[in-house]
Image (cartoon, grey):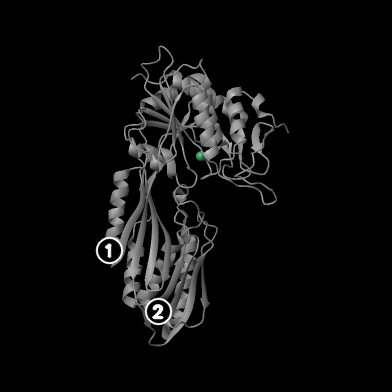
Amino acid sequence: MSCNISKLEPQNVWKYFSEICAIPHPSSHEEAIREYVVNFAKSHNLECTVDKANNIVVRKPATPGMEGKKVVALQSHLDMVPQKNNEKVFDFTKDAIQPCIDGEWVTADGTTLGADNGIGIAATLAVLADDKIQHGAIEALFTATEETGMHGAFGLEGGVLNADILLNLDSETEGELYVGCAGGLDANITFKCENVKIEGDYKTFEIYVKGLKGGHSGVDIILKRANANKLIFKALKIVNEKYGVQLASIAGGDLRNAIPRESKAVVLVPVEFEAEFIKEIKTFEVEADAQYKGIEIGVEVALTPVEAVATMIDPKVTINLINAICDVPNDIISMSTSMIGLVQTSSNLAIVKSNEGEIHIECLLRSSSNDEKDSLAKDMASVFEAQGAIVEFTGGYSGWNPNMESPILKAMGDSYEALYGKKAEVTAIHAGLECGVIGGVYPKMDMISFGPTICFPHSPDEKVNIESVAKFWDFLCNTLNNAPQK
Ligand SMILES: [Zn+2]
């Protein structure tokens, strides 16, 4: 294995990437890399500003004769994800990443490489440093702290960029052009409730829905996997209506952006219906398992007798809760009409948890259409409010709706075909990207996201394909040369 990556082509990109690897830059420790970019701008006599959110903008004028081109922003993020193998002794805030050539790939030794998004930064610096590339005016935007919440993008103000076009250099498959992403909104729902004393003869059971695959609530929602919270409440509705089964406690899901794999409820079963209840849950398990055949490996609805509890949730609140959760829109809400196979709007009933005096519910709504996201939020609020819950929305950000008529998409599609004799794949993602957030502040911005091929980002196995970096670079230069006129 050789570690001399600066000999690779294109040399300038690898030279800058090698310098970036030597500067510690995990999320929220970006001072040194910021200083490096600011010093780079100074030494190349380029205008440079740092905003309140620690984003850097470097401006380079058009090459002579190219002044008529639209202004292009080249965007990458400054931070990297710090992940290492267990046995590796490494301090991401102090130690330099050691990039190595391994066959067709550049990888690091037991740590993340930071090709996400170091190659994007390096390519931008290589454009800024090069006098031979033909391009219109360029604004290089380096955003802060993308990996842990897109803080730089959220802090970016209007009026900072003059660009008409934004090229985000943070995608991970060469030959793919991203033209859309989903925005998000967090729903926080509370049912206030008094726990009441148990009167009458009940047997106490735990119902445990488990064995589900779960997955990312955006990217994996298309797979139509089971949601453990939805399933358990479907079962609760049946046994509550038929046998008067009551709820003592509920705990399902733990992350807002993960499809819940497990959900547990402690329930009180009137003694006279114990046998029917057990049979009913067994039937429910068999039916749920059949419903998800081919999607889930197996749906398990385990039933265990447990120790008696002292109180239960107010039966009126339990009915309201069951009704709301069974009725609330969940999963895929709509598919995109401009791109086949893309989920446009979805919701994930992520967490349902009873605490002292309240039941707390969290959902994550996503949509590439801001209007649709707003109307889903209204629908959701009315379902819960009709059952007496308090609904609050927080953390909203914009989606990026695919524009198949985009001038930069046309220009890049033509460039790619001319360079490589095949069509670039046009795609979109049902998850948040910085482009969505930036497009929320700059709604007229014509945007594309692309990049070299990076495998296993955010893990110690991260690696970037060497040939794809060369193709990405040629394509970037070609795109700048062929960018649309003003
Ligand atoms: Zn990234």
- Which residue is found at the position 48% from the left and 83% from the top? 308
- Circle 1 packing at 10 Å, graded few (<14), some (14-19), many (20+), is some
Give the x, y percent position of residue 340: 40, 38
Residue 360 percent across, percent down from the top left: 39, 65
Residue at 40% x, 25% y is 72
Q: Which mark is residue 461?
A: none
Q: CA distance from mark 1 to mark 2?
A: 22 Å
The residue closer to the viewer here, 253 or 473, is 473
Q: Which residue is mark 1?
A: 385
Q: Are marks 1 and 2 in contact (CB under 8 Å)?
A: no
- Whether label 2 lies within 8 Å of ligand 1 gets the answer no
478 and 419: which is toward the camera: 478
The amino acid type of the residue labelled 1 equals Glu
Q: Is residue 308 visible?
A: yes
The quadrant in which the C terminus is found is top left
Residue at 47% in and 47% down: 219
* Residue 414 location, quadrant: top left
Asked whether the viewer can see residue 237, the reply is no
In the image, residue 330 above or below residue 234: above
| Secondary-structure class at tag 1 | helix
Residue at the far top in the pictured view: 65
Query: Please, which residue is most extreme toward the right here?
Result: 1
Badge 2 local density, few (<14 within 10 Å), some, or many (20+)?
Answer: many
* Residue indicated by mark 2: 312
Give the side of residue 277 with respect to residue 386, left or right: right
Which is more N-terminal, label 2 or label 1? 2
Up-down: is 45 above or below 141? Answer: above
Q: How far across and down, in percent of the image, does residue 405 sit?
A: 34, 28
